[in-house]
Amino acid sequence: MATTKSTGKFVWHEILSTDPKASVKFYTELFGWTTSEMDMGPMGTYTLFKRGDDQVGGCMQAQGGAPTFWLAYAHVPSVDAAAEKAKSLGGAVLVPPMEVPDIGRWTVLKDPQGAVLAAFTSPADAPATKDETQRGVGEFCWDELMTKDPDAAQAFYSAIWGWTMRAPKADDKTGYWHVAREGNIDCGGMMKAHEGMPSAWLSYVAVADVDTAFAKAQGLGAKPVVAPRDIPETGRFAVLIDPTGGVFAIYKSARH
């Protein structure tokens, strides 16, 4: 797993799948990722997704009858403190803090509105990951929270991950919040979920061409959620559901 020292930085993404073999087949064909495997004992096999020599994500069997979903990890100074803070703010600890030898310490938290995010702390001597602006095609480049209550979410996430969450301006009809981590570096976004939608995090993968990747994903069995569309002066994106039920987004920046 990739690591970092910057509080609030997204450092890892993994898909907890009801059918890991199908998920691995889909994402390697879509994004050109290669793989390597790790034996996780009773939890089964953990598949690492790689882009060249870089590890970009992982896949393992969903546990306890959970549906397929992508889980993002963001760095904190202490996962134990993060877990305690989450409970004090009305959230829940879904996976208690635990150690992965030579990798780091992690926990999975649920906010009061129901969205799930993992907290991760790297060892003191671990190398840093790429900054968001250095991530290229085939790498996770953005994470976005759809929430039933942006104000409540702002209080929860700022207290745990130290994010600065900038509310939209009065004349901004999109209602989009920008999330900045330590160093005032934009790392994600937040917006109010549409009526009837659950609160959830959505992870974006950078692609060379959104329309091409969107068509390819459907050819591999994915279902469209949001067809390719432009974000003025920002980029182009689309949202899909993979063949096992995992929701993900693809993105091409207008800047490069």
Image (spheres, rainbow, N blue to C red):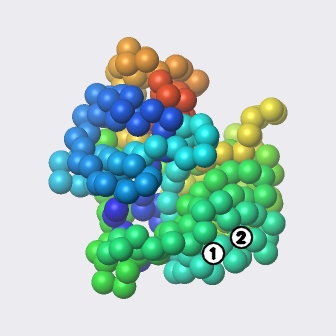
Q: Nearer the viewer, residue 142 or 79?
A: 79
Q: Is residue 225 above or below residue 173?
A: above
Badge number at residue 113? none
Identify the image quadrant of the C terminus.
top left
Please state which amino acid type lies under the numbered disc 2: Ala
User: What SS does tag 1 mark?
Assistant: helix
Identify the image quadrant of the N terminus.
bottom left
Q: Position of residue 151 (x, y in %)?
A: 80, 59
Q: CA distance from mark 2 to mark 1?
A: 6 Å
The residue wearing badge 2 is 86
On the picture, is 239 further left or further right than 1? right
Q: Is residue 212 above or below residue 178?
A: above
Q: Is residue 232 visible?
A: no
Residue beneath the point at 78% across and 58% down:
112
Q: Is residue 188 visible?
A: yes
Q: Residues within 10 Å of mark 1 (few under 14, many from 20)?
A: many
> Marks 2 and 1: CB-CB under 8 Å?
yes
Q: Position of residue 38 (x, y in %)?
A: 29, 54
Q: Nearer the viewer, residue 142 or 44?
A: 44
Q: Position of residue 42 (x, y in %)?
A: 43, 54
The residue wearing badge 1 is 82
On the picture, is 18 further left or further right than 40? right
Please state which amino acid type lies under the numbered disc 1: Ala
Snapshot quadrant of residue 103: bottom left
Q: Nearer the viewer, residue 195 or 165?
A: 195
Residue beneath the point at 73% across and 63% down:
92
Q: Position of residue 144 (x, y in %)?
A: 58, 48
Q: Is residue 256 above or below residue 54?
A: above
Residue beneath the point at 68% across and 65% down:
93
Q: Residues within 10 Å of mark 2 (few under 14, many from 20)?
A: many
